[in-house]
Image (tube, rainbow, N blue to C red):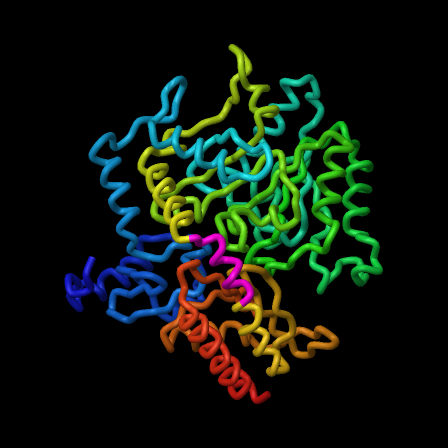
Amino acid sequence: MSNAMFTEEEKKRLKISARKHVLGHWMCNADLDKGVKIFTSGKGCRITDIDGNEFLDTFSNLVTCTIGHGREEIRHAINAQLEALEFFPNYHDGFSAPLVKLAEKLAEIAPGDLEVTFFLNSGSEANETAVKMARQYFWQTGQKGRYKVISRRGSYHGTTLGTTSWTGFPALREPVEPLLPGSIFAPQVKCSECEMKLCYPGCGLACLKELERIVVSEGPDTVAAILMDPLPGSNSGYPVPPKGYLEGVRALCDKYGILLIFDEVQTGFGKTGKWFACEHFGVTPDILDVSKSITSGYAPLGACITTQKIASAFQGPGNEFRSGSTYGGHGISCAAALANIEIFQRDHLVERGAELGRILKEKLSSLYEFDVVGDIQGMGTLWAIELMDNRETRAKLKEEYGVFIRDWCYEHGMILRNNGNMLVIAPPLVISNEEVDEIVNNLRQAIQAAMKHFNR
């Protein structure tokens, strides 16, 4: 909708109404008090608000819109499916044609022997359903005692009651406790902030050894799955796991007969320079969970991609996987996903992700000139800049530099994500080299302004 279609009176009314009638996702009252933001249009890496202000979107609409806004190919695909058949549920013995075609395409691009897909609406649903799949798999194969799920502190997996149970941030868990039984936590794998106060490689992968100790302590025959993000997401600062860790987790799961679930809701579809982050480490899970960039945000969709071995447990009368939803695998969403993947392959966006990784690493590293910049971590288009009072001692900042820098960037036409004093960069794969320079230049000016503001 064009901004010209909104009168000044209507703009004011909508902003007031948003506060009154909408309970927002991950709502931040402190930010709302600064003023409601309503966005109305987008093109490429830019998005426009209701007042006509344009912004460079450096966080891809929550790490989702990887092919940029306003792609005609997606609109045509959605319209064609809408005209042909607006909806038929993926239910009982019925499928839509786009759903079947998308399952074929995912089998083609997924790593290893992942080739059977269960479709859902979101990443949270994908992660929760993957655990249901693991539990029922063991239930049907004579191991009904396997129900526990081991995840990691410092990792986010979703907002359902189940995925909140496996999310390793206490602040997100405590308000809705008690959570699901059998939820066990292992150490996060962030070498720059090792829980065990050790240093890689001299640590000998103590975090991996601790994970095995937990498995043994809990009883391997009670553990159904290990759920982890191979590259922890924006809440964690995109810490790349050390060499040998994910390989060791795969070997551990094989040793004890545990299913390995990778949450690639944030990291999937080219953003790390490969289709999926796990491919960087040569590790294939038993179930791969995706969402977000599967449609680049043009329609809601999630998916659990698994192996024929696991899927075979749900074949035959009476063995069916007992899960589903009305809209999971909606034909319009699947049509959007097919068009999205076609753009990825036609425009070589996975390769572009790798190229952008090299460019962003070099450009962002120049920010180390500021002594408040402690760590810069990530890969591909996924990067985090952690601000610190002292880089050597890793002392925390008392001031809210991250909020100041985010607000400065917004006032200067750039959307920036911050988690406290961690700045997160995750631009679309279609971003130009010139726009990368714009991001880094804005960050440089914003950090300078913050240092001046806080008298550093």
- Residue 212, image x and y in percent? 79, 41
Foreground residue, 95 or 115?
115
**Residue drawn at x 77%, y 37% as measured from the top left:** 215
Left or right: 39 as drawn, with respect to 324: left
Q: Position of residue 398 (x, y in %)?
A: 62, 76
Q: Is residue 29 above or below residue 150?
A: below
Q: Dividing the image into 4 quarters, which one contains the C terminus?
A: bottom right
Residue at 66 percent across and 78 percent down: it is: 389
Overall secondary structure of the magenta section: helix
The answer to whether residue 167 is magenta is no
In the image, 383 versus 422, the foreground residue is 383
| Position of residue 105 in the picture relative to residue 384 (left or right) | left
Q: Position of residue 142 (x, y in %)?
A: 69, 17
Above or below residue 23? Residue 420 is below
Q: Is residue 95 above or below residue 8?
A: above
Identify the image quadrant of residue 300. Answer: top left
Q: Identify the magenta region.
A: 348-358
Whether the magenta-drawn stretch holds residue 352 is answered as: yes
Q: Residue at x 31, y 53 (%)?
A: 21
Q: Quadrant of residue 193?
A: bottom right
Dividing the picture into quadrants, the one containing residue 27 is bottom left
Decide which of 125, 81 is in the foreground and name it: 81
Q: Where does the N terminus fall, quadrant-wise?
A: bottom left
